[in-house]
Structure formats: C-alpha cells, structure tokens
Amino acid sequence: MADEEKQGEGEDEGAEAPKKRSKLPLILAAVVLLGGGGGGAAWYLGLLGGPPDDIEAEAASLDPTAGMADPTAPGAMLEIDPFIANLADDGGSRYLKTTFQIEFATDVVPPDAQARTPQIRDLLLTLLTSKTFEEIRTPAGKQNLREDIINRVNQAIDDDTVRAVYFTEFIVQ
C-alpha cells in the first residue's frame, strides 16, 4: 500500500509540473502584449511624444487628394434651365428641348459657374443649334453631346471642375 501511495503522489507531482511550465509562456505573452499595447496607446495619444506634427503636415501635403472631394461621392449639382433650340437640319424643322444638371468635382458649385450663367447658356445654346438630329439621336451621340457640354462649361468658368452632365429631359421633334 505504501508503494501505491508513493505512485499516487508521484503522479500528482508529475501532473503539476507540466501545468506550471505551460502557464509561464502564456503569462509572458500576455505581459508582452499588454505592455506593447499600452506603450503603443500612450504613443498614439501623445503621452510619449507621438509623431511630430511636421510629419503629419508633410504627409498631408504629399497627398494629391488632400482638400478635394471624394471622387466617389456625388459632387455639387447645378441645374440648368431648359433649352429649346432649333437643330441644324435642312429646313430647320426639328428642334430640341433639353434640361440637364451639371455635376462638379467639388462639394460646392464654383462661384464662377454661378456668376457666368449667361455665358454658359450662350455657349450651350450655340452648341445645341450646331447639332443635327442624326448627331444626337443615338446613345453615342448623346454621350458626345455630354462631353461637348462639359468642355464648354469648363471653358466658361476657366477651370476643369465639371465631372458629369445628366440629362433630365431630352425631346427632339
């Protein structure tokens, strides 16, 4: 019986030793993670100095999109009053009635666009009356007209901020 007790005690001692060894790496890993996380948080919050302000400013100045609107977000829209224009077809029997909105790459409509509305309308009316029914009746023709409108508006405001043109009404008769 004494041998059995010694064997039982030996098994207990042997079982406890591996448990103590397996806890040590876990405790060390937890201490390292907590210490590193705490140090990183202190650095980020500026308690240990943090990154110098001039590095952040330099990083912002190197970013070409800094201060610009998100390219995927919708830009400011300018609604243009409807146009009714005779097309350049023989006999002048066809006309176009269209309404559209202009989207800018910025969050606000550029002040030049608001101030130059008469010039923009004049350039666009001249453009519309130069088109024939055959030029604008197809989807490709409408896309070409969009690009021409973008170019004319950018020319009027002397800037390349027009992102897109959206027709809200397009009637040819």
Image (spheres, rainbow, N blue to C red):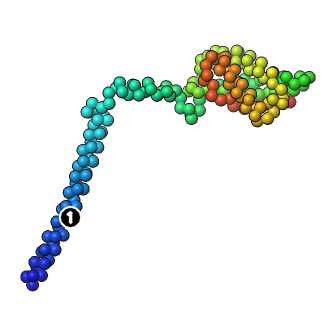
Q: Establish if 143 lies above or below 38.
A: above
From the viewer's perspective, is 12 left or right of 36? left
Q: Where's residue 65, x and y in %? A: 50, 28
> Which of the image's four quarters has the N terminus?
bottom left
Res. 1 visible in picture: yes
x 24%, y 56%: residue: 26
x 46%, y 28%: residue: 63
Neighbourhood count class around disc 1 (C-alpha, 10 Å): few under 14, some 14–19, many 20 upward: few
Q: Where's residue 23, x and y in %? A: 22, 59
x 16%, y 74%: residue: 11
Q: Where's residue 96, x and y in %? A: 81, 27
Q: Secondary structure at mark 1?
A: helix
The outermost residue toward the front is 62
From the viewer's perspective, is 51 left or right of 19? right
Residue underneath mark 1: 19
The outermost residue toward the bottom is 1
From the viewer's perspective, is 15 left or right of 86? left
Residue 135 picture quarter: top right
Res. 114 visible in picture: no
Name which residue type carries label 1: Lys
Q: Establish if 36 lies above or below 27.
A: above
Q: Where's residue 116, x and y in %? A: 66, 15
x 52%, y 27%: residue: 68
